Image (spheres, grey):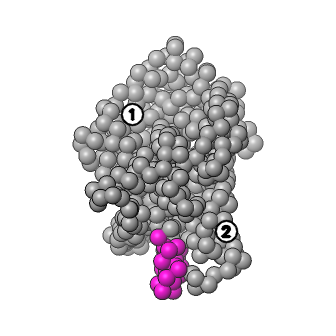
Amino acid sequence: MNASRLSAAAAARIVWALFLVGLLIAVVMLVRGQVGGDQLNLLARGWLLAAEGKWISYGNPMSTGGKAPGGITSLLVGLPLLLWRDHRAPNVVILLCHVLAYWILDGTLKRTLSPHERVLLAVLYWLNPWQLYFASFLWNPNYLFLFSSLHLWSCLVQRERARFWPSFLQAAGLALAFQVHASFLLLAVASLLLWWRRYFRVHWGGAVAGGVLASLPLIPWAIEVTTHPALVTEASKGFLGRGLILVFPLVRGLVYWLRYGSLYVSERMADFDFSGLLGSDRWLGPGLSAVSQTVLALTALVPLLANVRLWRGVRGPRPRGRWRARLTAPANVCRGDREWLKGYARLCFLAAVLVFGLSPTTIMMWQGLILLHAAILPVLLWAGALGRTHLASWVSKGTWIWAAVEIVLLVAIAFGNPQYRCGGRHTQRTDFGFNLRSDHPMMRELKIQQTCPWPLNVPGGWWPDVLPEGPSPSSPSGRGGSGI
């Protein structure tokens, strides 16, 4: 594949091939997906809706304390369970969201990108381990990728003129993301910055209609809060501006911005154990884990250099004002969609700086995923520019090597990562303990026990926050529901 000579038709064939490879791996992950504590909390909400018609008006416990607002979680998990009573049913919806997110990005950008850059998008986004790892199991952040792609699309199509449906979908997406995960703030702040710098226009009628409609699930939650204020008042961990004062939480978040565009995956994603396949695994799993955290860590230099390039070459009246000029440059100075994309990436980065700096807790790997689509843009645009120079052959070779390493990592994750295997070294249940203190029909009806059984009725064990408890050794007569 020569980057400078690749035709649109050839690029389309390569993109489809890469898409199918990634989709096949994602389906394998989905089939092998495991259920940890976070998943049990979500499945409990969905099962209560599907099996008993009980709608829980609030979401999972948040890292800052309290519960996520709104009952959209119960709908996202419960509706698939109406069609298929299996703990993997909601995962199918999540995978479809990821597929749709990629199609939206590809369809939005292919008119701006060269054929080689379109292939790069498939490699840097679709085959990205940071993306596909979260595409096949149940978790709140895993829904956010679709909102991200809709955000870029709606902003770009409204670059010159406000339109009803893009504004409707953007506002609805933000309102729904608010109910799914607190990291929606990254997209909300980015929207404010982009609108302030005139990167897109807003059709206020469409925005109000979308925001109001998507906020309807908040009404039962608001009623619930009046009788159970602990849903909100328990959210008191940390303090506002923690990242700015302690610095480390802010730096940690910005490092993740760089890692999203690299092969330097998190330690959690690189925890491999293939003993279930090989009988014993003394070397392969630990060795691959070590390589991913050392050798592949060097690939973070690529997005680092790409981001430096993104902020270089600014023309200003004096050198000191160049960076400020980049931060405040309005969209009307852009000379095309490519320059617009650079500005979009810069302002999303600035949104990350603001949100990570004000965050009351230390940033974790999943809390910036909603901006993954923006984090890869500097690498995409830089590699695309290099592909139009005398380095084109090197860029092509590098693209294939990058894709090959991604595929190896993804296959290793599908068969050796705790999220996609039962038993072995470490599991997804570690944070919640390995035992449940009670039992419930949901455990068998959703085939959780058949897939990878939990120890049940163990005194002192953990239990999902809204699921009623059955008889246990510590309570022969049983208990009522543990929900708030």
In the image, residue 173 lies in the stretch drawn in magenta: no
| First reached walking from the N terminus: tag 1 or tag 2 | 2
Amino acid at circle 2: Leu
Query: In this figure, which residue is indicated by the disc labeled 2?
Result: 20
> Looking at the picture, how far across and down is residue 324, in whole percent?
35, 52
Query: In this figure, which residue is indicated by the disc labeled 1?
Result: 64
> Looking at the picture, how far across and down is residue 254, in whole percent?
36, 53
Question: Is 247 in front, or is 347?
Answer: 347
> Is residue 65 shown to the viewer in this render?
yes
Question: Is 389 in front, or is 282?
Answer: 389
- Considering the numbered disc 1 on the image, is that residue within a helix, a strand or a loop? loop
Amino acid at circle 1: Thr
Q: Residue 293 carries which label?
A: none
Q: Give the range drawn in magenta.
A: 382-404
Q: Is residue 59 above or below residue 199?
A: above
> Looking at the picture, how far across and down is residue 408, in whole percent?
51, 72
Secondary structure character of the magenta stretch overall? helix
**Are discs 1 and 2 less than 8 Å apart at CB?**
no
In the image, residue 386 lies in the stretch drawn in magenta: yes
Q: Which residue is drawn at 36% across and 59% down?
A: 316
Q: In which quarter of the image is the N terminus?
A: bottom right
